[in-house]
Image: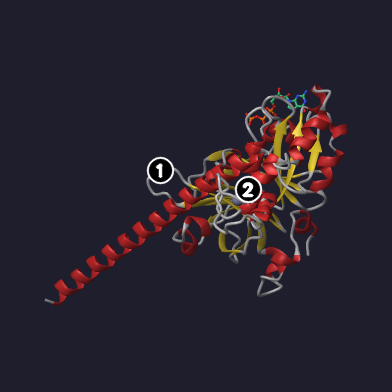
Amino acid sequence: MSDLLQRLGLVPFFIQQLTDAGLLQDRLGRVTSVQRSRSTVVCGSGEKVVELSSVLRQSDAIDRPTVGDWVVLDDSLSRIEHVLERKSLFKRLAAGSNNEIQPIAANIDVLFIVTSCNEEFKESRLERYLALGAEAGATPVIVLTKADLVDDVDCYVQRARSTQTGVPVETANALDPATLDGVRSWIDKASTVALVGSSGVGKSTLLNTLAGHALTATDEIREQDKKGRHTTTHRELHMLPSGGLLVDVPGMRELKVADINQSVGTVFDDIELLAKHCQFADCKHETEPGCAVLRAIEENKIDRRRLANYKKLLRENALATATLAEKRAQGRAFAKVVKEGKNVKQKRTKI
Ligand SMILES: Nc1nc2c(ncn2[C@@H]2O[C@H](COP(=O)(O)OP(=O)(O)OP(=O)(O)O)[C@@H](O)[C@H]2O)c(=O)[nH]1
Ligand SMILES: [Zn+2]
């Protein structure tokens, strides 16, 4: 296997999906950016700007390649023929009329949930991002930036730890590389990391300090379009000089936590465990007698805010699921109309 592919994060999970070991040599690559129907792919022989095969062009948005995907190119290395099964996937329900589910970034191993040691810090926001990471299948790590600006970092660390049993928490001054050993330990060779967090918490600063240079300014790709014009795009999957890959996709930063689906329970496992001891199996933890969750709140073992956020995320989740189900039903109804339309047409031609 080429050293470059290894540095790009190629692991057995992907190799095992190849039907022919020969593909490994030159036709396998990783998507580093996507612009409409064209993608930039790094493969053993270098970087290529490629199109989609006609099958992929017509497939659902979710099945088309996205940043971080491992793909197989055609013989001429000019088209993506196949997208390998993903280890993890961040996706979102696109706004707008068609409401399709779009992929944002694939094969992210670790999600840095960035928050700063100041008034921006909110447990409820962290819990939302944790659910999002769990939903996508990435390992979450809370990164507390601006640790250099406060005296009571430990207090923030404790609060961050309270958001999910066992969640790792790292502190950092994003401007100072000497403080980033803890953060770096998660980007060990070839693991792919993405960042989420509110505006101003230090995501760009962290990225640039980790890379040792300003990423967005230097990682431009000059490419020629069909008419021979040069266009410039930004690479969104960056290889760090010390090993590891960072994904910085605009869509990642804008992720709404309504995109959570099944993962609320992963974050609130303490509440779900307690709920098993409630007197009623369908206890809503409101006013019911024998409620183990309310008892834990009275005994200060669980925060009232945390229970409220748990319920809120569950409600949002139910709403999102209902919306999706409705969309699917609409899609089916539409397909039926189209089919019936075709039948009518056929009948007419018979006459
Ligand atoms: N002292 C200190 N300042 C920091 C730290 N992290 C970020 N900053 C400063 O905070 C400001 C915002 O940082 P950015 O890196 O632009 O934040 P961002 O999360 O990328 O923001 P968006 O691009 O809006 O999403 C900048 O002025 C940084 O220099 C830190 O750990 N310590
Ligand atoms: Zn209860």
* Above or below: residue 330 compared with residue 158: below
The residue sitting at 74% across, 54% down in the picture is 8
Residue 205 shown left or right of residue 265 in the figure: right
Question: Quarter holding the C terminus?
Answer: bottom left
Residue 96, numbered label: 1
Q: Which amino acid does label 1 sit on?
A: Gly
Question: Quarter holding the N terminus?
Answer: bottom right
Give neighbour class at mark 2: few <14, some 14-19, many 20+ (Cα, 10 Å). many
Residue 230 quadrant: top right
Q: Compare residues 255 and 153 and report the one nearer the observer.
A: 153
Residue 129 quadrant: top right
- Indicate the secondary structure of the residue bearing disc 1: loop
- Indicate the secondary structure of the residue bearing disc 2: helix
Residue 18 image offset from top left, x and y in percent: 67, 71
Mark 2 vs mark 1: give the one in front.
2
Q: What residue type is labelled 2?
A: Ala
User: Alpha-carbon distance for marks 2 and 1?
Assistant: 24 Å
Q: Compare residues 225 and 7 and report the one nearer the observer.
A: 7
Residue 5 quadrant: bottom right
Residue carrying label 2 = 131
Q: Say which label, 2 or 1, has the lower sequence index.
A: 1
Q: Which residue lies furthest to the bottom in this view?
A: 350
Is disc 1's CB within 8 Å of ligand 1? no
